[in-house]
């Protein structure tokens, strides 16, 4: 691994050299582009206004899927691309992506009947001809109820069962792409806000940005600039006179504990209220339910789930699983994000394409050579999007593009020839209780031993942060020293993932701050500030446990 990442001064070379590529935005698309470019030998600067994966990426349904629903809009190419990329992610990130079974219950009042669903399943299998996952199965009514007895039997005709993928923590996928980019020579700067693009003679040649941590202003020059800012794409383009590119839709989710009649596998259900598909997914020991899909014109930070959306998800879950009896009090927390979909004048949110658009401003009006903007995209297809973008960057640099390696070289935490053997050996030799060892593997992959190496024989660093947590103290140090974390919010929400525990990380914030104080030398003022900042941040998730300490 490279040298520790904190404290993080802005390297002098940022203002003194011209990069081959500057990427604005470190969501999964931006981080993937930076990794691909750096691995192919380009000099890369990756700028993110907040933390890695802190925007749309961490607001998803946490699936790696082929997009079965997209067949309804005849987007066969997108489905094929998604299924191919799903297979690649199962191999290059085995610690982060796992197969997950999905059941589609079929009811007599659904607009998608048995014939349509069977046809969709066949097409799904045909388009994933090179997959390692089993083919679909159609189930009778009796088979369906034996498999999932909690389903509402009224009007139930049967079900379809198939496999897709789940990524419990897409934040870690994004982080590993950014870390891999860094380890291949890229400079990765979080809390570096792009204020405006640098234009000379009608060409974009760089970006002016502000260091939000130390409040310095900088200019970075690049031969090509990729605007991968997600919902903020149009904001980055302010002042250039470009057409509106983003017409985002809002998606909200709720998280609940296991409940009566909860499914063993994921349910893919058609909502009765509006006919929109949504998911009830086993996730992280709990259930993730979502998503909504609403046109959105509000503020991009924070994006907060509405009570109407929460009520909609509760109501639809109770309809299909009548024994659930969920109420608002059962919601541990909720979260929302904005999908950076293409702007359209009309149409339902669900009909807007999920295919990404690589917008080359050199061929647009007004024309800005040297600038590319990314519109849309999915977590599942981030890698293939990055490959397309980097091929285009090489074309703009008038250089031959080397072969793209990212489809075969594992992400850092998946760098082993036999993941199952590695995991078994770690559990046997770590000296940790199995649930703690298993959690370290699911989050850090092959770097789990590095976390333990930091802990050494220190019992405080090997112990869980709190009685309700499986995260250990050494993870706090690992996040700050090696994983580009700058704040405790970064650590809990997008490194240790404890911010997604039932209490939204509120039980871990004080112990984590104490570790930082005692091992990283934080003074009491910073400890108080970081704890208060985290409590304020968590309020957007409407946690059942109060965010403010009594």
Image (spheres, grey):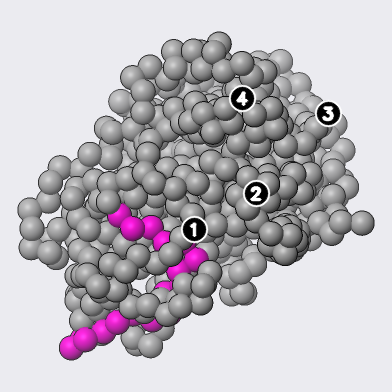
In the rendered structure, which disc, 1 or 2, sits on the residue that comes first in sequence? 1
Q: Which residue is mark 1?
A: 7
Q: Which residue is mark 4?
A: 457
State the mark number for residue 260: 3
Q: Main secondary structure of the magenta part?
A: strand
Disc 4, SS: loop
Q: CA distance from mark 1 to mark 4?
A: 26 Å
Q: Which residue is mark 2?
A: 516
x, y (%) of residue 6?
49, 54
x, y (%) of residue 310?
76, 54
x, y (%) of residue 418?
38, 17
Where is 162 relative to 9, above or below?
A: above
Q: CA distance from mark 1 to mark 2?
A: 13 Å
Residue in the foreground of this view, choosing between 212 and 317: 212
Relative placement, left or right, of 516 versus 478 is: right
Region rendered in magenta:
186-202
Residue at the (54%, 13%) spot, across then down: 429
In the rendered structure, which disc, 4 or 2, sits on the residue that comes first in sequence? 4
């Amino acid at each position: 691994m490279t040298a520790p990442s904190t404290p993080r001064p802005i390297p002098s070379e940022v203002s003194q050299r011209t990069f081959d590529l500057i990427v604005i935005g470190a969501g999964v698309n931006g981080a993937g582009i930076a990794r691909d470019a750096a691995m192919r030998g380009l000099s890369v600067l990756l700028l993110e206004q907040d933390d890695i994966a802190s925007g749309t990426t961490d607001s998803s349904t946490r699936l790696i899927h082929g997009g079965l629903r997209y067949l309804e809009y005849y987007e066969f190419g997108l489905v094929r691309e998604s299924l191919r990329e799903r297979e690649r992610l199962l191999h290059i990130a085995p610690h982060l992506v796992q197969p997950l079974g999905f059941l589609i219950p079929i009811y007599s009042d659904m607009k998608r009947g048995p014939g349509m669903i069977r046809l969709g399943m066949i097409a799904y299998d045909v388009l994933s001809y090179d997959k390692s996952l089993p083919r679909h199965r159609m189930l009778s009514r009796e088979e369906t109820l034996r498999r999932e007895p909690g389903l509402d039997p009224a009007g139930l005709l049967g079900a379809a069962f198939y496999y897709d993928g789940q990524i419990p923590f897409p934040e870690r996928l994004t982080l590993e792409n950014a870390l891999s980019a860094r380890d291949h020579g890229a400079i990765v700067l979080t809390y570096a806000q792009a204020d405006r693009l640098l234009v000379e003679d009608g060409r974009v040649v760089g970006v002016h940005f502000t260091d939000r941590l130390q409040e310095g202003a900088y200019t970075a020059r690049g031969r090509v600039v990729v605007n991968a800012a997600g919902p903020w794409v149009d904001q980055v383009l302010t002042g250039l006179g470009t057409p509106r590119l983003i017409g985002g839709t809002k998606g909200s989710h709720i998280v609940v504990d296991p409940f009566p009649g909860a499914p063993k596998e994921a349910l893919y259900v058609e909502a009765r209220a509006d006919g929109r598909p949504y998911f009830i997914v086993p996730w992280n020991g709990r259930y993730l339910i979502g998503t909504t899909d609403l046109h959105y014109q509000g503020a991009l930070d924070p994006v907060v789930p509405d009570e109407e959306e929460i009520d909609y998800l509760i109501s639809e879950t109770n309809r299909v699983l009548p024994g659930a009896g969920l109420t608002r009090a059962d919601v541990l927390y909720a979260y929302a994000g904005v999908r950076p979909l293409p702007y359209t004048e009309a149409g339902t949110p669900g009909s807007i394409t999920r295919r990404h658009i690589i917008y080359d401003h050199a061929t647009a009006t007004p024309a800005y050579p040297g600038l590319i903007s990314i519109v849309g995209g999915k977590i599942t297809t981030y890698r293939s999007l990055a490959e397309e973008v980097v091929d285009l960057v090489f074309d703009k640099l008038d250089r031959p593009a080397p072969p793209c390696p990212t489809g075969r070289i594992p992400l850092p935490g998946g760098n082993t020839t036999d993941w199952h053997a590695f995991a078994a050996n770690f559990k046997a030799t770590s000296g940790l209780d199995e649930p703690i060892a298993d959690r370290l593997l699911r989050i850090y992959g092959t770097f789990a031993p590095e976390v333990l190496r930091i802990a050494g024989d220190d019992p405080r660093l090997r112990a869980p942060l709190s009685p309700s947590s499986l995260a250990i103290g050494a993870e706090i140090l690992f996040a700050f020293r090696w994983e580009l974390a700058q704040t405790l919010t970064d650590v809990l929400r997008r490194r240790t993932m404890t911010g997604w525990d039932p209490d939204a990380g509120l039980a871990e914030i004080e112990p984590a701050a104490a570790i930082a104080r005692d091992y990283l030398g934080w003074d009491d003022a910073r400890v108080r500030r970081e704890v208060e900042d985290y409590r304020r941040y968590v309020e957007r998730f409407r946690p059942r446990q109060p965010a403010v300490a009594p």
